Image (tube, rainbow, N blue to C red):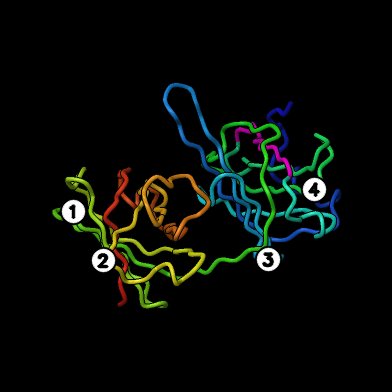
Amino acid sequence: MVNEISDTFDVQFTALTDKYKGVVSASALFWKRYHGGNNVEYGLRIEVPTLMKEFVDNVNLGADPEGFLFFNNISDLDAVDGKYNVVYNTVDDIKQRAARVQFFHQNQGSFYAEFLAKDPNKTVDYLIDSQVGAWATLQIGSASAYIKKYSDESNILIKIPAIKKQATFNVPENIGNQAVDVWGNIMFKDIKRLLSSDTPSYADYNQDRIIFYSASGSTGSTDFTAYFIPMESAPDDALGDLKFEANTVYWSDL
């Protein structure tokens, strides 16, 4: 059974530094989705570019606090399914709030690696006990992207100058009549999947990210085409107060 932690970020960071042999920069993508009533589905992705590793459970996207991965041996981060806990601390100082992920193979409490990040906005306000995920080699490309939508139009345009690609899709009935004008980072597994085509693909649009799939019915799947996250300096409402699914996404060359 896992519980909240009372220690500050600084105290936890020092303790983990003493406990583990290595520490590298990493980022965590936390995800949760409500399925009616009190049914909640959770997901997690940890990206460790320095080690060319990623840990995935259920989805590859979500909020993205930057933090650190503490570990003893890189060989522990293998492709075998492993378990993890997600915990958070209960301090009042928002600068010391933290989210923590604890990795283990079978024995709860015997961890081979842990992730720690500051979480001032309390992205993580829930506990996960012994959920299953897997480590894999990190194979993903990224590029800067620009999103534009006028408040009086339903069309959204995404331009990715570095790879000379763009995508367009519509907001259903222009809900909210909101404007969007933001730069960010778009990540993709295979640039060949961003081909010009007369066949539409699919987008899951949320207030903090946009996830693209080859077809509808894939929401929450790790088999995404691409996903967009606004740059860190962008305001919290950079993508507008919008949440919808679009099945009319068209990719083309710039």
62 lies left or right of 45: left
Residue drawn 36% across the image and 78% down it: 164
Q: Amino acid at mark 2?
A: Asp
Mark 1 or 4 closer to N-term? 4
Q: CA distance from mark 4 to mark 2?
A: 52 Å
Residue 246 disc label? none
Q: CA distance from mark 1 to mark 3?
A: 39 Å
Q: At numbered mark 3, what does the secondary structure look like: helix, strand or loop? A: loop
> Does 81 appear above or below 184?
above
Q: Is residue 127 magenta?
A: no
**Residue at the disc numbered 4:** 16
Residue 31 percent coordinates (x, y): 52, 42
Neighbours of disc 4 within 10 Å: few (<14), some (14-19), many (20+): many
| Viewer-nearest of discs 4 and 2 | 2
Which is the main secondary structure of the residues drawn in magenta?
strand
| Viewer-nearest of discs 4 and 3 | 3
**Residue at the disc numbered 1:** 154
Q: Amino acid at mark 1?
A: Ser
**Residue at the disc numbered 3:** 52
Instruction: In this rendered view, identify the residue nearer to me: 111 or 57.
Output: 57
**Residue at the disc numbered 2:** 198
Residue 220 percent coordinates (x, y): 48, 44
Q: Are marks 1 and 3 in contact (CB under 8 Å)?
A: no
| Viewer-nearest of discs 1 and 4 | 1
Residue drawn 29% across the image and 50% down it: 246
Mark 4 or 3 closer to N-term? 4
Q: Is residue 87 magenta?
A: yes
